[in-house]
Amino acid sequence: MGQMLIMDNNKRGADRMKRYTLGLYEKSMPNNLSFAEKLLCAKECGFDYLEISIDETDEKLARLDMSKEERKYLVDVMAVCGVPIRTMCLSGHRKYPLGSLDEGTRAKGMEIMKKAIDLADDLGIRVIQIAGYDVYYEEGNDKTKKYFEENLRKSVEYAAEKGVILAFETMETEFMNTVEKAMEYVKLIDSPYLQVYPDCGNVTNAALDYNTTAFDDFKTGKGHIAAVHLKETVPGKFREIPFGTGHVNFEKIIEISWELGVRRFTLEFWYAGNEDWKDVIKFNKRFIEEKFAA
């Protein structure tokens, strides 16, 4: 019986090795690298795609205003390098949230959303991971939730026109730190173009607060998880934790995700100014691949 179980586990691991795609988070590399250099690094390290970052900095937000020529050039670069950009981490709404009490800030947030969807459409990006915040730097209340819902509906409608999926990241704050909370809005909007893109590290931390497990929380998103961020955390800390030193059970997260039909995963970690950053990328990929093969 034990031997049969081992054989079954080996078969599942071999099956997964053939049928999933693994992406590399752009911020795992030095910021001064060109897109070509980042794509070639992803290729060299064995990743299937790159996740582009559009954060709240002026530098990253400026990407939303790429000219048609720049967009075509980037598509050509992807083809030459042999690695596409398939997902976008859109965190620019921290500064310009959809639920802000300030009308101008909300308008800017909607402008960012529409431009991000247009950029995704032009570059062939399948999924935009959107932040699960009504507001970030402001104090949330019933009004911020109302504005968030209204603008979310508009955003999803525009995404549907372009055929681009918006998917919530589970965050480190109470508003949306679990898949279950994200699903409340997925069910409310009720569109195939709004899904969930959970951060397994954030969910693992939240599970401690709610006396549950990340695995049970993932199951609440059955049929609605577009991709998964694979990130390490420790209780109370949500980023820059080396893989293998935290408390995330990656084997179980991958197993549950696989059972739920997820086949797209992104390895999320940050470049920390270290000279051996490429070795870190390769180590982290090997670490995760072992979890898929388990």
Image (spheres, rainbow, N blue to C red):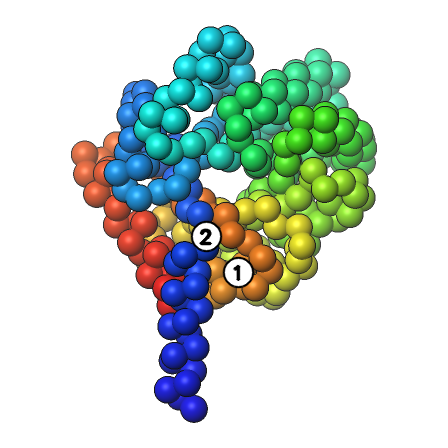
* The C terminus: image quadrant: bottom left
Task: Pinpoint residue 274: horizontal percent, then vertical percent.
Answer: 22, 35
Q: Earlier in the sequence, mark 2 or mark 1?
A: 2
Q: Is residue 272 above or below residue 78?
A: below
Give me the C-alpha separation between circle 2 and circle 1: 9 Å
Task: Pinpoint residue 47: horizontal percent, then vertical percent.
Answer: 35, 42
Task: Pinpoint residue 168: horizontal percent, then vertical percent.
Answer: 62, 41
- The amino acid type found where label 2 is placed reads Tyr
Depth check, front residue: 292 or 240:
292
Depth check, front residue: 213 or 21:
21
Residue drawn at the location 26% of the way across and 50% of the way down: 283
Residue 250 visible in the picture: no
Q: Is residue 51 above or below residue 178?
A: above
Q: Secondary structure at mark 2?
A: loop
Asked whether disc 2 touches disc 1, contact meaning CB atoms under 8 Å apart, the reply is: yes
Q: Describe residue 27's horizontal placement relative to residue 138 as left or right.
A: left
- The quadrant holding residue 143 is top right
Residue 196 visible in the picture: yes
Q: Which residue is mark 1?
A: 258
- The quadrant holding residue 103 is top right
Depth check, front residue: 148 or 123:
123
Q: Is residue 196 above or below residue 32?
A: below
Q: Which residue is mark 2?
A: 20
- The amino acid type found where label 1 is placed reads Trp
